C-alpha cells in the first residue's frame, strides 16, 4: 500500500510540474496546451503570418520562406536603402523582395519578430498583451500604432481561443535573435 501511494505521489508531483511548465497554471492541461499549439500553428500558417514575418531566401521558383528564421521578422542586417519615392496616383505602396519591409503614405514599416526571443521578439509579452495588441492595433497593447500592412483589424476579430492558440504556438517556436528596425512614421500619419 505504501509503495502505491508513494508512486502516486511521485506521479502527481511530476504531472504537476509538467502542467505548470506547459501553461496549465492558467487552467490549461498539457494535452489541451498541445492542442492549442497545434491549432495556433494551423492558424499562423493559414492566415498568412509567414508572408510578411518570415524572411525569404532564393529558391528554384523564386523567393521561399527561410524556415531557419521562421517568423523572425525583417532581417536586422538587410541594409535596405531608402524606399523609392512614389508619384501621386494609383500605385502607392512598395515592398522589399522578402515582403518584410513596406513603404507607403504611413511611412516605412518592418515586420516584427514574432519568435519568443526575450530581447528582440515576443519573449516578454504576456498573453494579455498579445490579445490587446490585436484588438487595439497598438504595439504591446498600449503604445504606438501598428502600421500597414499588418491587418490587425482582421485578426482582432478572431475569438479569444484562436488568438490564445496563436500566442501559444508563437511561444513554442525556436527564438531567433533579430532586432527589427523601428518603423518610420510619416508626419501625416501620427
Image (cartoon, rainbow, N blue to C red):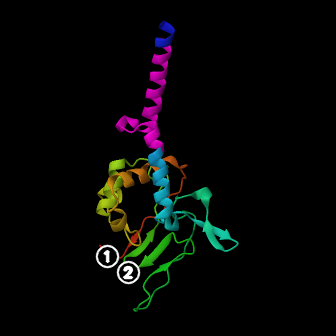
Query: In the rendered image, which residue does mark 1 sit on?
Result: 189
Near-viewer residue (118 or 47): 47
Please provide percent x and percent y for residue 185. 37, 72
Label 2 vs 1, first from the N-terminus: 2
What's the residue at 49%, 63% (across, down)?
46
Q: Quadrant of residue 54?
A: bottom right
Is residue 190 found left or right of 18 in the rendered image?
Answer: left
The reply to whether the magenta stretch includes residue 144 is no
Q: Is the magenta stretch mostly helix, strand or loop?
A: helix
Query: In the rendered image, which residue does mark 2 sit on?
Result: 105
The boundaries of the magenta stretch are 6-34
**Disc 2 from disc 1: Cα separation:** 8 Å
Near-viewer residue (124 or 158): 158
Cβ atoms at labels 2 and 1 below 8 Å apart: yes
Residue furthest toward the front?
1
What's the residue at 42%, 51% (across, down)?
165
Image quarter hosting the C terminus: bottom left
Local secondary structure at mark 1: helix
What's the residue at 53%, 50% (across, down)?
173
Local secondary structure at mark 2: loop
Residue furthest toward the right?
60
Is residue 134 found left or right of 182 in the rendered image?
Answer: left
Badge 1 crowding class, 10 Å Cα cut-off, few under 14, some 14 to 19, many 20 or more, is few
Amino acid at each position: 500500500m505504501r509503495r502505491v501511494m508513494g508512486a502516486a505521489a511521485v506521479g502527481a508531483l511530476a504531472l504537476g510540474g509538467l502542467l505548470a511548465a506547459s501553461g496549465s497554471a492558467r487552467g490549461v492541461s498539457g494535452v489541451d496546451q498541445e492542442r492549442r499549439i497545434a491549432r495556433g500553428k494551423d492558424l499562423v500558417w493559414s492566415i498568412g503570418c509567414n508572408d510578411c514575418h518570415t524572411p525569404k531566401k532564393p529558391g528554384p521558383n523564386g523567393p521561399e520562406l527561410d524556415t531557419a528564421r521562421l517568423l523572425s521578422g525583417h532581417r536586422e542586417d538587410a541594409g535596405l536603402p531608402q524606399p523609392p519615392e512614389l508619384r501621386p496616383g494609383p500605385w502607392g505602396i512598395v515592398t522589399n523582395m522578402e515582403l518584410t519591409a513596406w513603404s507607403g503614405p504611413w511611412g516605412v514599416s518592418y515586420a516584427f519578430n514574432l519568435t519568443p526571443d526575450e530581447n528582440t521578439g515576443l519573449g516578454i509579452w504576456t498573453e494579455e498583451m498579445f490579445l490587446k495588441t490585436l484588438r487595439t492595433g497598438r504595439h504591446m497593447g498600449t503604445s504606438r500604432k501598428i502600421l500597414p500592412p499588418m491587418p490587425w483589424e482582421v485578426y482582432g476579430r478572431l475569438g479569444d481561443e484562436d488568438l490564445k492558440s496563436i500566442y501559444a504556438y508563437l511561444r513554442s517556436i525556436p527564438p531567433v535573435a533579430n532586432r527589427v528596425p523601428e518603423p518610420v512614421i510619416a508626419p501625416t500619419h501620427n
